[in-house]
Image (cartoon, rainbow, N blue to C red):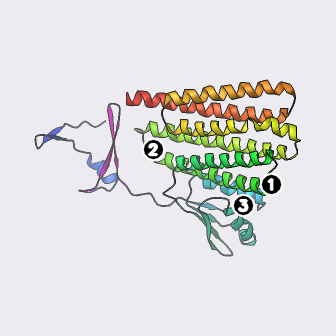
């Protein structure tokens, strides 16, 4: 521990010297800026540095070029926040088509170089995107999916399978982008930024819940295609309520209004009870169980939003 004395400068400001070893370690010089982060009774000082050099990984061997494996493998690397992926597997050149087409599943990933002994993929940084923007887009896709499900119930479906597939692809790409942004954001967190860390972790969990809700809606839509008119009618009364709950879940997480979060949780509980009661009539039981799972995930989002609101209340109080 190093101790320094405060010095009064100009009659109104205080100055404290920094250890020379620390200045040398970060190659700082006169006129360089440092960042001060205040946290309770502590101030953290850190260098104001430019964005670090790109993060690169080198893959010496790809276990399989099966498209499903390749999508999962590249997706895992992408979600870590890596900027450049160099594949030096001698078999890679034979599978450039599979690699190139798989890269299109990830927002910002492109094949930049391809030769007999190396394939280079670059994951471009998208500065205008933040995790809240991505979650908002995920919410919009969920709303669009509900609109398609409603059209299906009303017998107005047209190329429903193609539309559902498009929704699935878009949602998967956005979910992986949200994970990537969270992981990149967490690398920049300092000790003094626990609130930001909590928000990033909460965002990661909310995006995962939205992704699982989307999967359940995809399953629901496929069941509805094969269902009769009575089952479709039975499910139709819950669609507008789900749409309202989706909007409330997003608003609850992105704001810090504890009253609104409480109202959202009460509505989720009410819709859950209504679905459970309707199961007794025996119509569309499997589909209603899917709706109940969606409600449980929405309730979990509400609990995250509630805890966030309480933290905000005490932090600003």
Give the residue pinned by disc 1. 161
Where does residue 292 sit, x and y in percent of width and height? 74, 31
Asked whether residue 110 appears in the rendered view, the answer is yes
Instruction: Determine whether label 1 and label 2 are within 8 Å by CB.
Output: no
Asked whether residue 90 appears in the rendered view, the answer is no
Is 305 displayed left or right of 28 in the figure?
right
| Location of residue 211 with respect to 261 vertically, above or below | below
Between label 1 and label 2, give the one nearer the viewer: 1
- State the SS at label 2: loop
* The N terminus lies in quadrant: top left
Res 243 → quadrant: top right
Q: Nearer the viewer, residue 268 or 182?
A: 268
Residue appearing at x 52%, y 42% in the figure? 200
Where does residue 28 sit, x and y in percent of width and height? 30, 55
Range covered by the magenta-colored residues: 29-55
Where does residue 228 sit, x and y in percent of width and height? 89, 41
Where does residue 16 sit, x and y in percent of width and height? 21, 42
- State the SS at label 3: loop
Residue appearing at x 65%, y 29% in the figure? 268
* The C terminus lies in quadrant: top left
Is 260 displayed left or right of 26 in the figure?
right
Give the residue pinned by disc 3. 62
- State the SS at label 1: helix
Query: Is 107 part of what is drawn in magenta?
Result: no
Q: Please give the label number shown on residue 189.
A: 2
Q: CA distance from mark 1 to mark 2?
A: 42 Å
Q: Earlier in the sequence, mark 1 or mark 3?
A: 3
Q: CA distance from mark 1 to mark 3?
A: 33 Å
Res 123 → quadrant: bottom right
């Amino acid at each position: 521990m190093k101790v320094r004395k405060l010095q009064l400068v100009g009659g109104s400001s205080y100055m404290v010297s920094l250890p020379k070893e620390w200045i040398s370690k970060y190659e700082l010089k006169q006129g360089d800026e440092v960042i001060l982060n205040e946290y309770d009774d502590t101030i953290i000082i850190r260098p104001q540095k430019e964005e670090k050099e790109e993060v690169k990984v080198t893959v010496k061997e790809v276990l399989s070029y099966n498209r499903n494996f390749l999508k999962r493998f590249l997706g895992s690397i992408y979600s870590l926040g890596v900027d450049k992926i160099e594949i030096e597997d001698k078999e890679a050149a034979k599978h450039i088509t599979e690699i190139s087409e798989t890269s299109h599943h990830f927002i910002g990933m492109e094949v930049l170089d391809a030769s007999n002994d190396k394939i280079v993929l670059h994951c471009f940084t998208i500065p205008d995107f933040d995790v809240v923007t991505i979650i908002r887009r995920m919410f919009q896709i969920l709303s669009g999916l509900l609109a398609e499900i409603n059209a299906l119930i009303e017998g107005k479906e047209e190329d429903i399978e193609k539309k559902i597939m498009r929704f699935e692809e878009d949602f998967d790409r956005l979910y992986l982008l949200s994970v990537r942004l969270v992981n990149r954001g967490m690398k920049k967190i300092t000790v003094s930024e626990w609130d930001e860390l909590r928000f990033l972790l909460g965002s990661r969990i909310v995006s995962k819940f939205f992704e699982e809700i989307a999967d359940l809606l995809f399953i629901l839509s496929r069941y509805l295609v094969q269902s009769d008119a009575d089952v479709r009618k039975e499910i139709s009364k819950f669609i507008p309520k789900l749409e309202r709950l989706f909007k409330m879940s997003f608003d609850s997480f992105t704001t810090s209004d504890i009253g609104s979060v409480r109202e959202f949780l009460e509505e989720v509980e009410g819709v859950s009870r209504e679905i459970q009661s309707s199961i007794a009539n025996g119509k569309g039981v499997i589909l209603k169980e899917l709706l109940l799972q969606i409600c449980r995930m929405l309730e979990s989002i509400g609990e995250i939003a509630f805890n966030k609101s309480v933290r905000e209340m005490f932090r600003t109080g």
